[in-house]
Amino acid sequence: MSEFLLELIYIVGCITFIVGLKMLSSPDTARRGNFIAASGMILAIIGTILFYRNEAGQPVGNIPWIIGGLAIGGGLGYLMAVKVKMTAMPQMVSFFNGTGGACSALIASMELFSSSNSEPGFLMVAYLGIGVGTITFSGSMVAYGKLDDKINDLRSRLMPYINLLLFAVVVGLIGYATFAPQAMGDTAGWWLLGIALVYGILFVMPIGGADMPVVIALLNSLSGIAGAFGGLLYGNRIMLIGGILVGASGLILTALMCKAMNRSLMNVLIGNFGGGAAGSSGAAGDQTIREATVNDVAIMCAYASRVAIVPGYGLAVAQAQHACHEFEKLLEDKGVDVYYAIHPVAGRMPGHMNVLLAEADVPYPKLVEMDDANPMMPNTDVVIVVGANDVVNPAAETDPGSPIYGMPVIKVWEAKSVIVMKRSMRPGYAGIANPLFFHERTKMLFGDAKDTMNKLITELKTL
Amino acid sequence: MASVATFFLENQEMIFLVILAIFLGVEVISNVPAILHTPLMSGSNAISGVVIMGSIIVIGYADPNDTLQLVLGLLAVVLGTLNVVGGFAVTGRMLAMFKKKK
């Protein structure tokens, strides 16, 4: 009877995951989708505790320990999720992703070390669970540190080779330990844990800036795959299906992010962005830039009929989203049509800008995706670029020598005039010269994005 | 190689499930608007916390006299729960911010 109930609960759980994910992909149903998936998860947890039976037909024991663990993890997780500032969301998601990976690695190693099973199938799944889980854990924690500005990018020419080597060692070790189980015994598991831990750290270390969204999406996918190996290990269908669903959807998101940069996943992971060819688009020194004053910009915008705002990571750094929203509302009150044009890899995680602006109460129909925004550009009077750089670089279209040539960008230069808000002339993350700054329709407005926005707001109010 | 074939035959059902689930995952997610990328990722991240079932099973059959196993199992349950609860709560908070124009 209990086996029947458990399978029934697992089937319901699987359905809630699928329906929940589906609903998460539309703004109107997303909240309900999240709730449905969460309910399914709670149901499955309760079902496992009450109805799971091992081969000998015994129920789950050590109940006080389980309840204790659930209470500690649940309380801590809830507190962290509720207390975290909205702007620290990317690192929080990364952190939780890492704990899931650690859980997968831990259960796979406990299963491996406590079992005398030496069938290749079992060993392979256990080793893969340890490897993928550990990489997810250490990679996510490094990503967490980077997003939280605790860890800096570490790049060197040797890095790609070290990483390729480590990756080969991880794969080789899993294969060797699987098919020659006597050779290393349990030590293989320890070696794998150690090497995968180091690999996870080193493969995220050199990646930064615009490449971050790709890595975050990839780590998300890996956490699902690690969970699926756990499912195979226990013959547990809900773990398998839940894990694979996440793994597959994470890979789609990763591919989407790569496409948004016109680069292959390999290229991102090996990480030669902004390398060698950076100087090819010509020295910037001999070109002149035009500076605008706050007053000019306020007047231009107030008398425009359509204004676009293109946000980038600089907006997040300066925490200018609230000022930005107020500026937008003031313009709307003056009858100006304002929209935000958002590049898929703007910011440090997929959808970063959307979350940031939503936090400032910007209604989401105002957030226009790149593909829809580009045809609107010629009919836009003023484009304000706030802290974005590479995603509005015309060199991606015109200069075959540029490292970002071929990357889809927001064609702000097609608008009637462009205002670039920037702290200085320092190039963006990738270190690529941006001809947009010298474009005849461009004017620069130097300063901190939040300060400048506030000055614009004051100026607008006096008009 | 023979052992691999046995493994394959014994786990046929699982392998079919994996293949179907991959296509399902891809199908469910395609055409998601960019505005939902972060909540979607965070929500699916919470779903990957489904490994918590494994941690419950591990600790559930641990020898009650083996403190090391119990502690490690407890750690696994805590980590898994962090992922599940934190993931869904963060997603809920994020989604609460997305509002339509009044």
Image: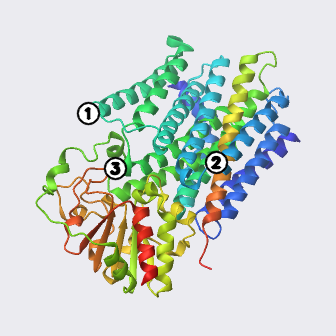
Residue A378 placed where, x, y %?
Answer: 30, 81
- The residue carrying pointer 3 sits among few (fewer than 14), some (14 to 19) or many (20 or more) residues within 10 Å by Cα, namely few
Q: How far apart are marks 3 and 2 (CA)?
A: 27 Å
2 or 1: mark nearer the eye: 1
Q: Going by the picture, which residue comes out furthest to the front? A: A462
Asked if marks 3 and 1 touch (Cβ < 8 Å), the reply is no
| Secondary structure of the residue carrying numbered label 1 | loop
Let me know if residue B31 appears in the view.
no
Mark 1 belongs to chain: A
Q: Residue at x 51, y 73 (%)?
A: A326
Residue A343 placed where, x, y %?
Answer: 40, 64
What residue does disc 2 label? B46
Residue closer to the observer: A463 or A125 = A463
Mark 3 belongs to chain: A
Q: Going by the picture, which residue comes out furthest to the right? A: A1
Quadrant of res A267: top left
Check the picture and name the quadrant holding the C terminus of chain A. Answer: bottom left
What residue does disc 1 label? A157
Q: Residue A264 carries which label?
A: 3
- The amino acid type, in three-letter code, at marker 3 is Ser
Q: Distance between the residues labelled 3 and 1?
A: 20 Å
- The amino acid type, in three-letter code, at marker 1 is Arg
Check the picture and name the quadrant holding the N terminus of chain A. Answer: top right
Q: Is residue A121 above or below residue A294?
A: above
Mark sitting earlier along the chain (3/1)? 1
Q: In this view, does A159 lie above or below A304?
A: above
Pointer 2 and pointer 1 on the same chain: no
Residue A392 placed where, x, y %?
Answer: 31, 64
Mark 2 belongs to chain: B
Q: Which residue is drawn at 82% across and 37% down?
A: A49
Q: How far apart are marks 2 and 1 (CA)?
A: 36 Å
